[in-house]
Image: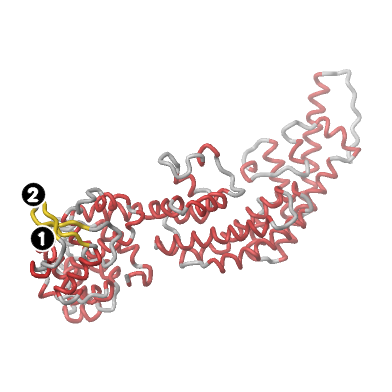
């Protein structure tokens, strides 16, 4: 289907899912033509309009046609949609031979083709087509099925009269077929779907005439098709993701599950029902940035097919990455963190690219190797695992992952150096009395391996004040902020000392201020 160009199919799906069979007309009849003295676009002739509109794709044509009654009328011109019918479906459309307009025909075939192309993950449509096996589906769906050369359904058994009415194939053509007797239906003919398609093509002479016959046979009631298309448009990402995640062959399914959950923080209770009816698919999608984006339709400009290919390529890269990491002589903690941070870096670097187009496995793997090198450099800078976990929340950490600029690595080193300076000052022998008197909620802030979260910077409490001053010093390196930290700590210790002395007048502590 040629509508994948410019990723316009997603918007077409949205447009068509909102429009019923009778809603292809603009409901706003208040076209403001009063008091219009200047010449505008609506003053152009229909011929000029059509010349301009011929350059638009179907999505843009629908947009323009939804603005006012005049443009709706011109945008519904058969000559415009005949061209799009030919381009999108590869079949010429003969307006004179068809009982419906080219625009309506385009809409119906577009909805059917979209649903049929995704039959493998569309359980609702599967129930319509498979529910009555070994008997054929409802005649409405059988009419559409004859347009498809390859149909994943068992052989069809139909009365001769049905074949004549549905496809116009004359009795003489069917005489040589093996017939089964049925008391109620009379002569029953058994066909493979491909054989039935070939008979229809041979009888009508061309695929264009087969399309015309099917469209002419259709009733005016397409509510079921429209409802199923609307449902698919809203759920297509979830359906396709579920199919991809749980419908792999057994060996690949186990492998995918292992890679999907490898070193990812997850609830064992929620993943124990993997693939079952009670499985929380939304939760599983949330475990990875890329699957979460796909679930919300944010990959490949909302193209579900291209998006799921990106997801497949991403997990193919994850498989290679796990094998690479496990081949190193690393402990589990380091292996896990290298993996997590590498995936984070890959996502940060390729997020915009994935939103626009398909990202191949080789592209993922190329970026992953660069990111893993940078993660290992950060690990060497941190010296040990405790420091490494502490710096992961720094803005410089992610900036270095994305850019590889050594300036950000210097910032990380400076942060660790300043954290060490504060720690060393606090644990000087001369400041033993400070450590003894400092309130318990302030003490941890001065230890080297303590993280200062941004949430703790707000408020008027003493821990918030100390956290703010510490944050300013650690990120700026200015000495005046270090002196402010020392002053604030000593002030708090002395306040505790005064409180202690007031409670115990006989006590005597001689502080030595450094």
| Element assignment for label 2 | loop
**Image location of residue 401, percent across then percent down:** 65, 61
The x, y position of residue 408, in whole percent, is: 70, 62
Locate the N terminus by quadrant: bottom left
Residue at (65, 44) in percent of width and height: 453
Image quarter of residue 150: bottom left
Estimate how packed mark 1 is, as few (under 14), some (14 to 19) or many (20 or more) residues with alpha carbons within 10 Å.
many
Residue closer to the observer: 88 or 451: 88
**Callout 2 environment at 10 Å: few (<14), some (14 to 19), or many (20+)?**
few
Q: Is residue 434 visible?
A: yes
Query: Residues at badges 2 and 1 in contact (C-beta under 8 Å)?
Result: no
Q: Which residue is mark 2?
A: 184
Left or right relative to 8: residue 286: right
Mark 2 and mark 1: Cα distance apart in space: 13 Å
Mark 2 or 1 closer to N-term?
1
Judging depth in this view, the residue of 34 and 471 nearest the camera is 471
Depth order, front residue of 463/136? 136
Q: Which residue is mark 1?
A: 160
Q: Is residue 184 above or below residue 213?
A: above
In the displayed structure image, the side of residue 113 where residue 365 appears, left or right: right
Image side of residue 243 versus residue 86, left or right:
right
Q: Secondary structure at mark 1?
A: helix
Please provide percent x and percent y for residue 64: 25, 69
Query: Who's the residue at 25% across and 48% down the image?
Result: 131
Q: Is residue 67 visible?
A: no
């Amino acid at each position: 289907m040629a509508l994948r160009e410019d990723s316009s199919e997603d918007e077409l799906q949205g447009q068509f899912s909102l429009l019923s069979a009778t809603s292809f007309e603009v409901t706003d009849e208040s076209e403001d033509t009063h008091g219009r003295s200047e010449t505008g676009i609506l003053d152009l002739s229909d011929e000029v309009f059509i010349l301009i509109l011929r350059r638009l794709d179907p999505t843009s044509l629908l947009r323009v046609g939804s603005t006012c009654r005049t443009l709706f009328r011109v945008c519904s011109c058969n000559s415009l949609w005949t061209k799009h019918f030919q381009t999108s479906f590869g079949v010429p459309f003969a307006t004179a031979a068809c009982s419906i307009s080219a625009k309506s025909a385009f809409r119906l075939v577009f909805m059917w083709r979209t649903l049929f192309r995704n039959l493998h993950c569309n359980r609702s449509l599967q129930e319509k087509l498979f529910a009555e096996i070994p008997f054929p589906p409802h005649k409405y769906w059988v009419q559409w099925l004859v347009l498809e050369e390859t149909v994943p359904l068992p052989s069809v058994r139909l009365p001769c009269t049905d074949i004549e009415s549905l496809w116009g194939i004359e009795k003489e053509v069917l005489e040589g077929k093996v017939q089964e007797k049925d008391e109620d239906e009379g002569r029953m003919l058994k066909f493979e779907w491909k054989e039935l398609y070939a008979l229809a093509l041979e009888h009508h002479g061309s695929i264009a005439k087969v399309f015309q016959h099917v469209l002419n046979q259709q009733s005016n009631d397409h509510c079921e098709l429209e409802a199923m298309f609307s449902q698919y448009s809203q759920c297509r990402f979830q359906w396709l993701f579920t199919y991809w995640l749980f419908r792999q062959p057994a060996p690949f399914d186990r492998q995918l599950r292992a890679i999907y959950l490898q070193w990812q923080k997850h609830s064992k209770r929620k993943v124990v029902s993997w693939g079952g009816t009670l499985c929380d698919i939304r939760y599983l999608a949330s475990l990875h940035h890329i699957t979460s984006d796909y679930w919300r339709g944010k990959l490949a400009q909302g193209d579900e097919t291209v998006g799921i290919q990106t997801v497949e390529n991403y997990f193919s890269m994850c498989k290679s990455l796990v094998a690479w990491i496990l081949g190193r002589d690393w402990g589990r903690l380091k292996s896990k963190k290298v993996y997590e941070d590498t995936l984070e870096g890959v996502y940060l670097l390729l997020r915009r690219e994935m939103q626009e187009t398909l990202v191949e496995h080789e592209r993922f793997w190329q970026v992953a190797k660069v990111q893993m090198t940078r993660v290992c450099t950060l690990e060497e800078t941190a010296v040990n695992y405790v420091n490494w976990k502490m710096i992961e929340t720094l803005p410089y950490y992610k900036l270095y992952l994305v850019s590889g600029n050594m300036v950000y690595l210097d910032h990380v080193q400076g942060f660790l150096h300043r954290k060490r300076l504060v720690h060393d000052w606090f644990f000087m022998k001369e400041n033993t009395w400070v450590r003894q008197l400092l309130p318990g909620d302030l003490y941890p802030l001065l230890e080297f391996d303590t993280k200062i979260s941004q949430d703790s910077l707000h408020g008027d409490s003493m821990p918030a004040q100390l956290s703010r001053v510490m944050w300013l010093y650690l990120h700026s390196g200015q000495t005046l902020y270090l002196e402010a930290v020392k002053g604030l700590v000593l002030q708090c210790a002395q306040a505790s000392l005064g409180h202690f002395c007031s409670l115990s007048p006989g006590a005597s502590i001689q502080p030595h201020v450094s």
